[in-house]
Image (tube, rainbow, N blue to C red):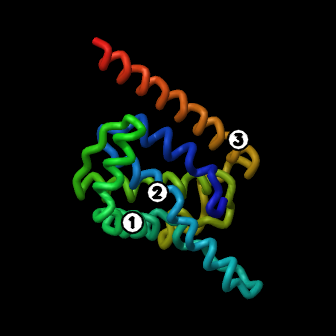
Amino acid sequence: MPLTPYHLGPNSLVGLLFKRWLDLPVFVAAGFVVDVEVLFIEKFHQGEYIPRYAHTLLVSAAIGVGLAVLMVPFKKPCMAVMKKIGLPYRSGFVTMVLSGVLGAWLHVIVDGFYRTGVGIFWPLDMTNPFCRYSRKETEHLCVLALAAAVCVYLILAARRSKKKRT
């Protein structure tokens, strides 16, 4: 699902549920950054099969670490945005790195639900044990996850509003 909004659902839901331990902006961004590889493949594809190495746990972990490092200078703007949407935000470097890796891994697993050609455990194994669904089924699961994320956000907002009144 190259650069589609579908990864927003699972990454937002997990990020909101575990926001105490994860850096939500990094976690959600990591759900998209892995697909930059797909843009390169589409741009330079010459008809031959090109494996998606970024869609492996090993390479996506490195991408997640790189994203976290790149986002360090944007911590204060992220803090301002998170404050505006009513989500407290405190994060350290280790949390950002962990969030980058886990967010990228969630992307790989979600794509692994329907892509047979993704060797998630490369270089050890090029098979995909997660491939159980069609692309449409996976997209529906992602939309459901987004709806659940919106519900979680609304519950968190209601709790904050209630605390402010008391």
- Side of 109 relative to 41 (left or right): left
Q: Classify 10 Å Cα crowding around label 2: few (below 14), some (14-19), many (20 and above).
A: many
At 42% from the left edge and 26% from the top edge, which residue is drawn? 157
Comparing marks 1 and 3, which lies closer to the viewer? 1
Check if mark 2's residue and mark 1's residue have beta carbons within 8 Å: yes
Residue at 73% x, 84% y is 48
Q: Is residue 13 above or below residue 154?
A: below
Q: Is residue 100 above or below residue 126?
A: above
| Residue at 50% from the left image edge and 38% from the top image edge | 13
Give the amino acid type for the residue marked by disc 3 in the picture. Answer: His
Q: Is residue 142 left or right of residue 64?
A: right
The nearer-to-camera label among 3 and 2 is 2
Dot 3 or dot 2, earlier in sequence:
2
In the foreground, 2 or 49:
2
Going by the numbered disc 1, the residue's amino acid type is Leu
Q: Which residue in the structure is indicated by mark 3? A: 140
Residue at the disc numbered 1: 67
Badge 2 or badge 1: first in the primary sequence: 2
The disc placed on residue 29 is 2
Q: Secondary structure at mark 2?
A: helix
* Vertical position of residue 80 compared to residue 119: above or below: above
Q: Residue 75: horizontal and vertical position, in percent? A: 30, 56
